[in-house]
Amino acid sequence: MNKQDLVSKVADKADISKTKAASAVDAVIDAIKGSLKKGDDVRLVGFG
C-alpha cells in the first residue's frame, strides 16, 4: 500500500473527499515525523 492507496481507503471509510483524506493522512505523517525527530517513541499498536 502506498500513500495514495491509504488516502483512498481513508476517504472511502470516512466518507470524505480525497482532498480532506490527504490532509488527514499528511497530518498524521507529520505528527509521527515530528515525534521521531524529537527522539520520542512511536507505537501504533495493532498496525501492520
Image: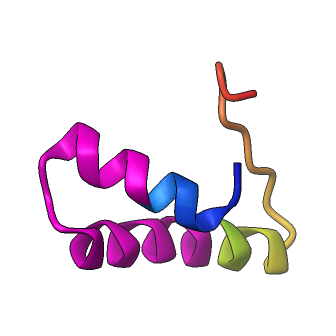
Which one is nearer the viewer's eye here, 13 or 32? 13
- Report if residue 18 lies within the magenta region: yes
Which one is nearer the viewer's eye here, 40 or 46? 46
Apparent side of residue 15 relative to residue 48 in the rendered image (left or right): left
44, above or below 45, in the image: below
- Spot occupied by residue 24 in the image (x, y as percentages of width and height): 35, 68
The magenta span reads 8-31
Which residue appears at 28% of the width and 69% of the height? 18
**Looking at the rendering, which quadrant does residue 9 occupy?**
top left
- Report the residue that reaches farthest toward the left: 15
Which one is nearer the viewer's eye here, 27 or 5? 5
Which residue appears at 79% of the width and 78% of the height? 38
6, above or below 29, in the image: above
Apparent side of residue 39 relative to residue 6 in the rendered image (left or right): right
48, above or below 3, in the image: above
Apparent side of residue 2 relative to residue 8 in the rendered image (left or right): right
- Report the residue that reaches farthest toward the right: 39
- Spot occupied by residue 12 in the image (x, y as percentages of width and height): 25, 45
34, above or below 36, in the image: below
Which residue appears at 31% of the width and 66% of the height? 21
How many numbered badges does the structure rendering display? 0
Q: Quadrant of the C terminus?
A: top right
**Looking at the rendering, which quadrant does residue 11 occupy?**
bottom left
- Report if residue 14 lies within the magenta region: yes
- Spot occupied by residue 47 in the image (x, y as percentages of width and height): 67, 28
- Spot occupied by residue 32 in the image (x, y as percentages of width and height): 65, 65
Which residue appears at 14% of the width and 58% of the height? 16
Secondary structure predominantly adopted by residues drawn in magenta: helix
Which one is nearer the viewer's eye here, 32 or 12? 12
Apparent side of residue 31 relative to residue 2 in the rendered image (left or right): left
The colour scheme of the drawn protein is: rainbow
